[in-house]
Image (spheres, grey):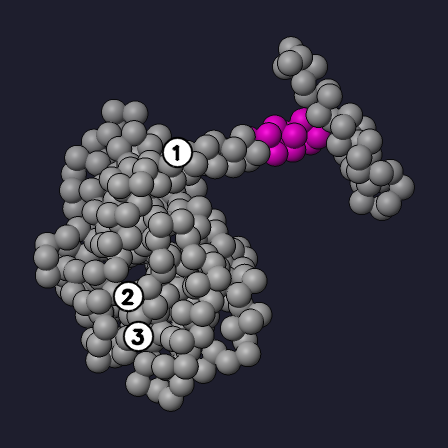
Amino acid sequence: MKQAASYFEKKSDVMLGKLLKEVENQTPTSIEILKESSSRKGNAHIVGITGPPGSGKSTLVNKLCKTLATSGLEIGIVAVDPTSPFTKGALLGDRTRMQELSGLSNVFIKSLATRGNLGGLAPTTADIVHVLDAYGKELIIIETVGVGQIEFDVLEIADTVVLVNVPGLGDSLQTLKAGIMEIADIYVVNQADRPGADESARDLKLMVREKMQDNWEQPILKTVATNNEGITELIEQIQKHKDYIKSSNIWNEKRKNQNLTKFNHLIIQTLEREVEKYISGKQDLQIKRQQVKDGKLDPYTLSAYIVGQLIEKHGGM
């Protein structure tokens, strides 16, 4: 544990990159890193940037961070990309998409592959964010993969969710309302120099009135990220939302819920490993599992039996 603690004292991009690689690959060392980060995290403002593909999320993040970096703010960016079916790595590299940021000493970019995860985030995104937080990043921006209505995982991690849309939502807004459109704290109509931007902003305002959060009316902003238009206003609204969640204690509650969610996930993962180890050590259970696979034995009976055996093995409840 002492060694893990020393990692966090050596502030360098090289060391941070090594820590994140261990965590991303879920190596044995990553457990010690995450244990240490658990006691250090909690100070960073975590902003999720989500929205459909082609809405200009990467450009928006690029311009947003470039402006924020001038204040000296320590920034971490987690860019989640689709997975290559061949290499299992990210299809789009962070350096190619955010070249303007690569030379800034106070901005660190980490690209992650979804590896088949359908929630818009990579499986290790939360752990990566926690390490960046523990390493002293003051603002962490998560750019989701852009898969549409299923990107709800970002809610478990982000303090502030920014949903990026494009002009011409039209009838699709009605479909989106039941899904991803309801999760945002701030709405952005990007590429607002295109026809239909005003109409899209108006439609969003009508939707927000129906789904207004307690004491926070979600703003609708228009941006043209390629020209840096609307970026200052977006930064102001992100800061306002941070002030709001801190003053209303939502900030602390989110972190408590995140801690409990992580605990529950770890319990499930640990139990899955224990069950697999138990089955692999007993030939009769392997035969029964095959019978479940073949439809000759119902899964309810066998799963209840195995859990009962494990509880008995470990001394009961």
Q: Earlier in the sequence, mark 2 or mark 3?
A: 2
Label placed on residue 293: none
Q: Residue at x 29, y 37 (%)?
A: 42
Q: Amino acid at mark 2?
A: Val
Q: Mark 2 and mark 3: span between their CA atoms?
A: 15 Å
Looking at the image, the residue that sits furthest to the left is 71
Q: Secondary structure at mark 1?
A: helix
Residue picked out by circle 2: 61
User: Which percent across, then down, holds residue 23?
Assistant: 37, 43
User: Which percent across, then down, holds residue 28?
Assistant: 41, 34
Q: Amino acid at mark 1?
A: Lys
Residue picked out by circle 1: 256
- 274 inside magenta stretch: yes
Position of the N terminus by quadrant: top left
Q: Residue at x 16, y 65 (%)?
A: 67
Q: Residue at x 21, y 80 (%)?
A: 227
Q: Earlier in the sequence, mark 3 or mark 1?
A: 3
Residues tagged 1 and 2 counted as in contact (Cβ below 8 A) = no
Position of the C terminus by quadrant: top right
Instruction: Please state if 61 lies on the left or on the right of 200 as rendered.
Output: left
- 13 inside magenta stretch: no
User: Which percent across, then down, holds residue 257?
Assistant: 43, 36
Q: Earlier in the sequence, mark 1 or mark 2?
A: 2
**Quadrant of the rendered image containing residue 185:** bottom left
Residue picked out by circle 3: 222
